[in-house]
Image: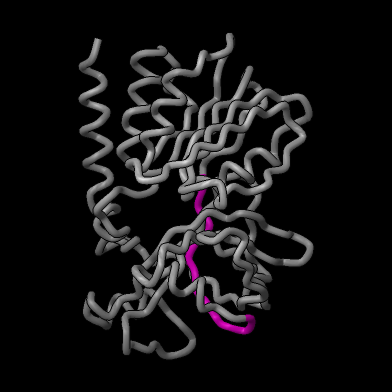
Amino acid sequence: MSERPGRRAPRVTTARVESVERITPHMVRIVLGGPGLANFSAGEFTDHYVKLLFAPSGVTYPEPFDLEQIRAERPREQWPSMRTYTVRRWDEVRRELTIDVVYHGEEGLAGPWAAQARPGDEVRFAGPGGAYAPNPDGDWHLLVGDESALPAIAASLERLAPATRAHVFIEVSGPEEEQKLETAGDAAVTWLHRGDAPVGAALVRAVSAFEFPPGAVHAFVHGEAGFVKELRRLLFVERGVARQGQSLSGYWRVGHDEDRWQATKREWNATVEREQDMQP
């Protein structure tokens, strides 16, 4: 994500790659550590995220790295690009940060970086941000997402108290992309395989057909913006779910890189809200 001009530069952490693991054919797990994480902290939310910084090709920065100075003194095209990734796990004792990166080939920035990363490599990131964790006062939980939301869903399941009810719908490209998920909660997990269908189509069908249990739901619905829009309408318009306290957002949008999506996301969300507020 590119920050808007005029905004104060976020705090940047420098970390070291400790390990790299291909946990599925298209998901790479990176564990970060090193002395730069001595003052880092996360754990309040299960959707904590960091923004990895990538320098444009051929551009180097002086040490110590100062993002605010870079933005003040260099042209926009020499600023580092940001790519947002959920914190899969934060180990407070070992001071290690785990992120899972979707890899779809040599296109993009973060995917190729993750595929080529080796222990000892240095990486910078801003953050963490975050806003969601399963509400213990909810009668049941609805967790829905594609690959981009899988780390947050997995972290949320690990946070559930024993016997807490949850219904989980996760769409991935195929059965080889499924992961083992741990939880103490009473969670029903449905894996959906996309194949050649549009992203999110299987999720919209499955959640639309799902009979909601009685009681107050606490929902987490994240991933490609198009299906999130459809499920937002389903929850708030068709099912009458109270909007306050729910977590629904497009992490990405088909046909947009992160820079373009973040530049248009606010307008997109405002338009979606206006359209759905007008529906009976």
Query: Relative to 167, is 68 on the left or the right?
Result: left
Q: Position of residue 228 (x, y in %)?
A: 37, 35
Q: Position of residue 97 (x, y in %)?
A: 64, 63
* Number of numbered discs overlaid on the protein picture: 0
Q: Residue at x 54, y 61 (%)?
A: 25
Range of magenta residues: 119-130
Query: Along the line of sight, which residue is nearer the eye, 200 or 118?
Result: 200
Residue 78, by quadrant, is bottom left
Q: Residue at x 68, y 71 (%)?
A: 38
Residue 86, compared with residue 188, is above or below; it is: below
Query: Relative to 22, is 266 on the left or the right?
Result: left
Q: Position of residue 103 (x, y in %)?
A: 46, 63
Q: Residue at x 52, y 38 (%)?
A: 170
Whether residue 82 is in magenta: the answer is no
Residue 134, compared with residue 35, is above or below; it is: above
Query: Along the line of sight, which residue is nearer the eye, 206 or 243?
Result: 206
Q: How is the image coloured?
A: one colour
Residue 119, compared with residue 45, is above or below; it is: below
Q: Main secondary structure of the magenta part?
A: strand
Q: Residue at x 53, y 54 (%)?
A: 86
Whether residue 121 is in magenta: the answer is yes
Q: Position of residue 16 (x, y in %)?
A: 61, 78
Residue 137, compared with residue 30, is above or below; it is: above
Query: Along the line of sight, which residue is nearer the eye, 178 or 43?
Result: 178
Residue 194, by quadrant, is top left
Query: Relative to 159, is 117 on the left or the right?
Result: left
Query: Relative to 116, is 189 on the left or the right?
Result: right
Residue 258, by quadrant, is bottom left
Quadrant in which the C terminus appears: top left
Quadrant in which the N terminus appears: bottom left
